[in-house]
Image (cartoon, rainbow, N blue to C red):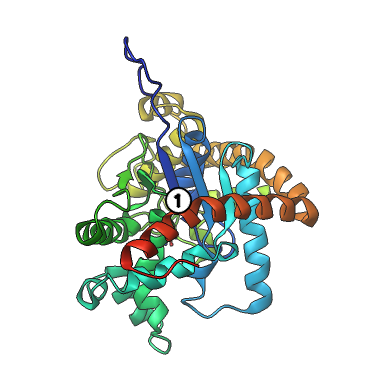
Amino acid sequence: MPEATETKEIPEKKKVIFSAIQPSGTFTLGNYIGALRNWVKLQNDYNCIFAVADLHAITVRQDPQKFRQNIYEAYALLLACGIDPQKSMFFIQSHVHTHAELAWILNCYTQFGELSRMTQFKDKSQKHADNVNAGLFTYPSLMAADILLYQADLVPVGIDQKQHLELSRNIAERFNGIYGNTFTVPEPYIAEVGAKVCSLQEPTKKMSKSDENVNSWIAMLDSPDVIMKKFKRAVTDSEAVVRVGEGKDGINNLIGIMSAVTGKTADEITAEFEGKGYGDFKTAVGECVVEMLRPIQKRFGDYIKNKDYLAEQYRNGAAFAEKLSRRTLDKAMKKIGFVAK
Ligand code: TRP
């Protein structure tokens, strides 16, 4: 938390944070610990703008019914995590038309070569070789539009999105260079505790919901039974000592999870489980995760049933976002030379 300096006449304006998450089914424990939980905290110190990035999600084929349900669920789950529409702007990306419009414009200020170098594009076009569409290619300019529309100062992103954020900065700088200052050039926001949660089955890999082995990841909406079962099956090692160490990726990961959930340090956890077996430890890790998720799951259950409440929130969010983002879009269009309406 920033310390107040002694002599400040003008109160500093809160910085703007933008982030978004794709509605690709349920979120994982990794999403929660690594990102969503931090978003909730950031709301107190920043002007936060959060979106469910549904436009980004159609770069891969979506089943219409499932897609719609995933969008509702993503919105409800973020509310349940503590995204507070009273504090932050929180909307569904496709509801705010300025995103697609600015994305088109920014496409014309983004080079083919730059987009070709994006590692995510290279990976995804290999994985979905039958559908290497133009949207998959220009995905980063839509992401740049999301961020630049709100003049965001900071963007909390994981390592997998860093290259895209770097490109957003380049696009902003290029545009500003041609037309004069138009967009704030965003900085990455690095969370203090960047807990990376790894797969429970292959603990050198990041926990991912695209992993075919469902035992390797915890969904935020998994039942307590399922969560306990997955932790009991988690891969460990043969040393049978709960401590952080080389070649102990499984235990290191479980200690990391317990530490992120309870706030205890790795040393405290090691001391607590001295002389105890991995079975006890895995049960304890599972239990603390279950207890952390319990109230979120309860709130999610309430929100998802209440479609009217959800609609009120996302409509309100979109109305605010449209008004704010319109200013930037108008400014950019005027600079380019479009005729005002
Ligand atoms: N592309 C991001 C992801 O898949 C989601 C996203 C969309 C985003 N727009 C954004 C993240 C803007 C940060 C800022 O995770």
Ligand 1 visible in quadrant: bottom left
Judging depth in this view, the residue of 284 and 341 nearest the camera is 341
In this view, the residue farthest toward the top is 6
142, above or below 278, in the image: below
- The front one of 275 and 34 is 34
Q: Determine crowd level at label 1: few under 14, some 14-19, many 20+ residues with C-alpha closer than 10 A.
A: many
Q: Residue at x 31, y 61 (%)?
A: 164
The amino acid pointed to by label 1 is: Ser
Task: Give the image quarter of residue 174.
Answer: bottom left
The vertical placement of 133 against 116, above or below, is below
Q: Tag 1, which secondary structure?
A: strand
Q: Number of marks in the image?
A: 1
Which residue is pictured at 60% across the width and 43% down the height? 81
* Side of 220 relative to 161 (left or right): right
Residue 133 appears in the picture as rendered? yes
Q: Find residue 219 and report its image quarter.
A: bottom right
| Residue 57 on image: x %, y % | 51, 70
Query: In this rendering, does residue 222 appear at all?
Result: no
Does the residue tagged 1 have its C-beta within 8 Å of any atom of ligand 1? Answer: yes
> Where residue 190 sits in the image (x, y, percent)?
33, 41
| Residue that appears at 31% across and 56% down | 165
- Seen in the picture, residue 64 relative to 70 is either above or below; the reply is below
Q: Nearer the viewer, residue 213 or 41?
A: 41
Pointer 1 residue: 19
Residue 277 coordinates in the image, percent (x, y):
47, 37
Image quarter of the N terminus: top left
> Image quadrant of residue 145?
bottom left
Residue 115 versus residue 331 in the image, above or below:
below
Does residue 165 appear left or right of residue 65 in this picture? left
Residue 216 horizontal/vertical position (percent): 48, 59
